[in-house]
Image (spheres, rainbow, N blue to C red):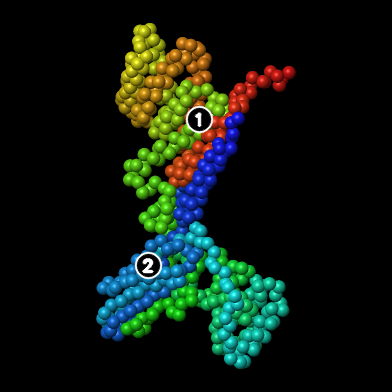
């Protein structure tokens, strides 16, 4: 007895491979699911200025390590300086060095960032944060404020809201704390006392067209099992705003040894670029496993753009023949005709197909009276098809019908075989059967063309090769179908009427 288990297992393997490949290309490599999708690119320029002391200079700029943003590229403009960009799992920095520097100096660091497709989750805070005890009476005032906020809150989120309200109130204990500490330092201290991990960070609010910007002080706090960014001045959380955390757990932003009067300014611009183009930049990275075709030469890419549409046409043919029950002249002839329609456009292709087949059938009927052998007859039909195409092309050019010139894209051998099969069918079954099978072939070719010419389908077929595993799985499942075709059910119409 035949077991279907190996077949089902094979189909499931194809589905898993297809879905896994699509997931990897989209989530890990950032390939967009739709054609023409644009992504926001933030271009940030840091302008660093200092005055040299006529000595050796080592200037160090701390770079951001925000997991929510992906670094696309970075450049430096620093004539006659040695430049080193150092990155590890904990920190990132760029160092400029020069043996002797005197006078005013200007250095530039430029970087492009995009929102991370799959940023992951930042490690949760472990244990209770270390508390720095302030001298009295400040520590006592902080405890009074915390007790007041705690009694008016029900959870961590509302406790933070109460602390922010107190921070911007005229409470006498808050006034005492703010006389010595900044708002950010006070809030971090109060949250640490409440055993909520919090730290001082500095970041950039990403807005296009901004110049001469400075990093703003922010609070990064672990609230309700997630890290959140808080702006103390506006007393709000900023999780919905694009904020690049630039400085975290770092003693300084810009250090200069051998210089003085150091300053730093930031400029921000925003642009949109093709998401597909940016995703394909990952191909050159050694740590990325690529399942795409963009590393191939351009001519090979263009070749595969057409070849990878054939499985789409095959799926259409199998569905319309096995499930619907349409009759065609030739098994996969409609796919090749559909690919020709892509070059000729649909209307021109349909007209050209009908003209070639009609005239070919007339000439083939004459050849049948010559009692030729099959090989000779087919060869003669091929030459006739070539002659018909040349004739229509010349006439179209003479009449100025440039759209009709694309008729030369029809596959000549396939057209010759189609004419031969229809001619034999005419002789054996009659003209009605020729119209049924010829019309069915044309309908299948048109539907396949509409599917193969769809922008979204073409995008998926070329950029997500796992789709073809899914197509094969569906074709295999339809290949096991042994029930009635939908068009065959009309035979039971008289029974339904009775």
Provide residue 482's location: percent of width, then percent of height. 59, 27
Between the residue at mark 2 and the residue at mark 1, the CA separation in whole angstroms equals: 53 Å
User: Which of these two is toward me, 279 or 239?
Assistant: 279
From the viewer's perspective, is the residue at label 2 or at label 1 nearer?
1
Name the mark on residue 317.
Answer: 1
Q: Residue furthest right?
A: 498
Q: Dot 1 surroundings within 10 Å: few (below 14), some, or many (20 or more)?
A: many
Mark 2 lies on residue: 110
* Residue beneath the point at 47% across and 33% down: 313
Q: Dot 2 surroundings within 10 Å: few (below 14), some, or many (20 or more)?
A: some
Provide residue 220's location: percent of width, then percent of height. 55, 73
Quarter of image, res 309: top left
Left or right of residue 298, residue 143 in this image:
right
Q: Residue furthest front?
A: 1
The secondary element bearing badge 1 is classed as helix
* Residue beneath the point at 28% across and 77% down: 98
Q: Is residue 375 visible?
A: yes
* Residue beneath the point at 33% across and 79% down: 58
Quarter of image, res 490: top right
Left or right of residue 56, residue 241 in this image:
right
In the image, is residue 138 above or below residue 346?
A: below
The secondary element bearing badge 2 is classed as strand
User: Which of these two is toward me, 144 or 6?
Assistant: 6
Provide residue 108's location: percent of width, then percent of height. 35, 71
């Amino acid at each position: 007895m035949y077991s279907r288990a190996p077949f089902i297992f094979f189909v499931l393997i194809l589905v898993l491979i297809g879905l896994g490949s699509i997931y990897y290309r989209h989530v890990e490599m950032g390939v967009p699911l739709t054609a023409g999708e644009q992504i926001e690119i933030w271009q940030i320029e840091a302008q660093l200025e200092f005055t040299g002391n006529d000595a050796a200079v080592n200037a160090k700029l701390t770079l951001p390590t925000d997991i929510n943003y992906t670094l696309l590229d970075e450049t430096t403009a620093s004539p006659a300086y040695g430049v080193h960009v150092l990155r590890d799992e904990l920190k990132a920095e760029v160092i400029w060095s020069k043996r002797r520097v005197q006078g005013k100096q200007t250095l530039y660091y430029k970087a492009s960032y995009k929102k991370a497709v799959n940023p992951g989750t930042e490690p949760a805070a472990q244990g209770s944060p270390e508390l720095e005890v302030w001298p009295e009476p400040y520590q006592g005032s902080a405890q009074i404020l915390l007790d007041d906020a705690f009694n008016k809150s029900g959870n961590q989120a509302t406790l933070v809201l109460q602390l922010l309200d107190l921070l911007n109130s005229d409470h006498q204990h808050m006034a005492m704390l703010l006389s010595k500490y900044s708002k950010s330092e006070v809030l971090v201290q109060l949250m640490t006392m409440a055993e909520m991990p919090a730290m001082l960070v500095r970041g950039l609010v990403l807005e296009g067209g901004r110049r001469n910007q400075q990093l703003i002080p922010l609070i990064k706090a672990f609230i309700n099992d997630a890290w959140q960014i808080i702006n103390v001045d506006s007393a709000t959380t900023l999780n919905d705003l694009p904020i690049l955390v630039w400085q975290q757990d770092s003693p300084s932003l810009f250090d200069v040894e051998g210089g003085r009067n150091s300053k730093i300014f930031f400029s921000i611009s925003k642009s949109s670029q093709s998401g597909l183009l940016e995703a394909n930049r990952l191909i050159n990275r050694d740590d990325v496993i690529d399942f795409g075709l963009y590393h191939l030469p351009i001519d090979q890419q263009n070749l595969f753009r057409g070849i990878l549409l054939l499985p789409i046409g095959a799926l259409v043919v199998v569905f319309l023949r096995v499930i619907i029950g349409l009759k065609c002249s030739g098994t996969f002839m409609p796919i090749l005709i559909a690919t020709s329609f892509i070059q000729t456009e649909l209307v021109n292709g349909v007209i050209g197909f009908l003209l070639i087949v009609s005239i070919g059938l007339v000439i083939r009927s004459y050849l049948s009276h010559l009692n030729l052998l099959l090989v000779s007859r087919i060869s003669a039909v091929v030459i006739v098809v070539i002659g018909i195409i040349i004739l229509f092309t010349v006439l179209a050019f003479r009449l100025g019908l440039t759209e009709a010139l694309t008729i030369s894209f029809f596959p000549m051998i396939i057209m010759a075989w189609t004419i031969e099969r229809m001619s034999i069918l005419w002789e054996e079954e009659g003209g009605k059967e020729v119209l049924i099978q010829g019309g069915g072939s044309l309908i299948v070719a048109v539907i396949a063309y509409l599917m193969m010419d769809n922008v979204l389908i073409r995008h998926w077929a070329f950029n997500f090769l796992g789709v073809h595993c899914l197509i094969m799985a569906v074709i295999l499942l339809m290949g096991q179908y042994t029930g009635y075709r939908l068009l065959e059910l009309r035979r039971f119409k008289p029974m339904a009427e009775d």
